[in-house]
């Protein structure tokens, strides 16, 4: 019988996990967060007012059983046309904090927020969660650590670069600070985080040169106007490696956005049924194209990005970095453009790492995950995208056995589920794990 659950991390995943335990009338929970602010995580806690959601408000409810919850919250605050709107991320952060504050006022006192850092977790006929100076006993623990910081780019040794010049954390408050009008900022990565950094620099009045570099130089595509079409109703009988060809063919009939969107109900199953070799081919060859079409920008964000490009301030380069040498005038970066043999040197006064979150347990510097992996309590998934879990979210130990008392949630379970980084996917995952921990999964014929 599970009576107490310890949830490690109070970002989006951990907060929803705690709230859903209450909604399912499940065990009491302790939500543990080391950051000053709980309930939002990096995506919504570190956002600038100019950053907006990449999904329309109508699909951003925190609860899969109440899809209009966020829209009603917005309408109560006077937001017009709420379902179709792309809302500022700071507003969504307020929504999540209100949900957490309401849950903490549960009259039964079933949720506690502990502001501390988890140093270790032990599994031995129960769970012991060690925080600074004390030990918390529970019946189950949930790892909700969110996205980990990105890898340093190839050829870059952060020990050899100053913190003023190199920003390994793209969300750090100092990223737009102390830049001159004639400075050059090199942003490594051309995905959604790069766009956040570019728009932040623009909002802060930076008028110097911005260069964004990635291996293929692909930019996320914009959302289009809402459309109705006859969606497919069965999982396509295709391999993951042929996904791009299938989407292109279908896109000729219904448009590429619709061709991608109609796969949403099936992508986790397609990934789960793919062989390890298929997954590897997809990640090596097709992932960049899938990402820029699947994870889109709000139209107004895309328009702002294009304006920065059209005025010549932002240049996007396809290529790879080879070396970095800091001198008094800045960092001299050696790079090779895609398809070229010649090596170029670029001078940047600041470099921002936007290569995307790290998931490989073998390379993480997160002390808790290092300890758990070293003792064999958790292991990396086969693709080294994160923590290996089964289809119920239970972590897999080094010996291949599932840990019934230790779960993982959110982006670090991407190796098992692939589509598990956006709100619609994570809210369903936290809902399902909460049902299991509350024994509510037996309701509705699932267990009998």
Image (tube, rainbow, N blue to C red):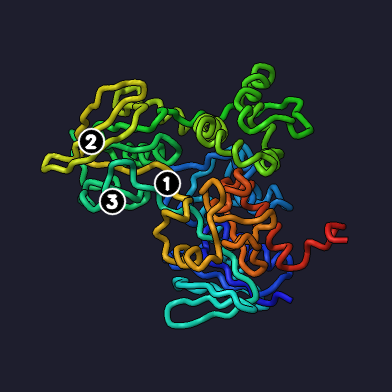
- Depth check, mark 3 against mark 2: the one in front is 2
Residue shown at the point (67%, 31%) measured from the top left: 239
Image quadrant in which you'd find residue 21: bottom right
Residue pointed to by mark 1: 49
* Residue 286 image position (x, y, % from top left): 54, 30
Residue pointed to by mark 3: 174
Q: Can residue 429 be seen in this view?
A: yes
Mark number, residue 224: none
Q: Quadrant of the N terminus?
A: bottom right
**Name of the residue lying farthest toward the bottom:** 134
Mark number, residue 333: 2
Separation (CA) of disc 1 from disc 3: 16 Å
Q: Earlier in the sequence, mark 2 or mark 1?
A: 1
Q: Is residue 100 left or right of residue 149?
A: right
Dot 2 falls on a residue whose secondary structure is strand
- Depth check, mark 2 against mark 1: the one in front is 2
Separation (CA) of disc 2 from disc 1: 32 Å
Image quadrant in which you'd find residue 104: bottom right
């Amino acid at each position: 019988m599970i009576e107490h659950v310890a949830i490690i991390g109070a970002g989006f995943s951990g907060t929803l996990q705690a709230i859903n335990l209450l909604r399912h009338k499940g065990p009491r929970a302790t939500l543990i967060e080391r950051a000053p602010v709980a309930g939002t995580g990096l995506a919504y806690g570190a956002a600038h007012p100019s950053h907006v959601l990449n999904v329309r408000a109508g699909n951003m409810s925190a609860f899969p059983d109440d899809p209009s919850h966020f829209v009603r919250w917005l309408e109560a605050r006077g937001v017009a046309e709420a379902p179709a709107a792309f809302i500022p991320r700071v507003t969504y952060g307020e929504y999540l904090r209100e949900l957490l504050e309401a849950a903490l006022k549960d009259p039964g006192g079933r949720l506690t927020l502990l502001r501390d850092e988890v140093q270790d977790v032990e599994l031995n006929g129960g769970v012991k969660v060690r925080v600074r100076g004390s030990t918390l006993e529970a019946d189950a623990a949930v790892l909700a650590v969110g996205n980990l910081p990105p890898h340093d780019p190839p050829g870059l040794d952060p020990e050899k670069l100053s913190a003023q010049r190199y920003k390994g954390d793209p969300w750090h408050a100092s990223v737009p600070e102390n830049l001159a009008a004639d400075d050059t900022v090199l942003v490594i990565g051309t995905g959604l985080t790069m766009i956040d950094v570019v728009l932040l620099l623009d909002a802060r009045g930076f008028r110097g040169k911005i260069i964004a570099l990635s291996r293929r130089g692909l930019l996320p595509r914009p959302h289009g106007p809402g459309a109705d079409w006859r969606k497919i109703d069965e999982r396509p009988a295709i391999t993951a490696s042929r996904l791009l060809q299938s989407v292109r063919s279908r896109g000729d009939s219904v448009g590429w956005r619709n061709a991608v969107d109609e796969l949403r109900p099936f992508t986790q199953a397609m990934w789960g049924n793919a062989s390890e070799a298929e997954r590897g081919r997809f990640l090596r060859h097709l992932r960049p194209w899938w990402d820029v079409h699947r994870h889109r920008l709000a139209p107004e964000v895309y328009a702002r990005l294009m304006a920065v490009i059209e005025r010549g301030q932002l240049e996007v380069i396809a290529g790879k970095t080879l070396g970095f040498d800091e001198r008094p005038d800045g960092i001299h970066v050696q790079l090779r453009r895609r398809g070229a043999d010649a090596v170029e040197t670029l001078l940047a006064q600041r470099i921002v790492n936007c290569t995307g979150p790290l998931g490989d347990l073998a390379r993480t510097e997160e002390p808790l995950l290092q300890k758990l992996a070293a003792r064999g309590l958790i292991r990396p998934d086969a693709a080294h995208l994160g923590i290996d879990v089964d289809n119920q979210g239970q972590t897999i130990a080094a010996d291949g056995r599932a840990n019934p008392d230790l779960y993982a949630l959110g982006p670090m379970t991407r190796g098992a589920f692939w589509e598990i980084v956006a709100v619609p996917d994570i809210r369903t995952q936290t809902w399902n794990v909460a049902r299991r921990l509350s024994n509510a999964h037996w309701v509705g014929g699932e267990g009998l």
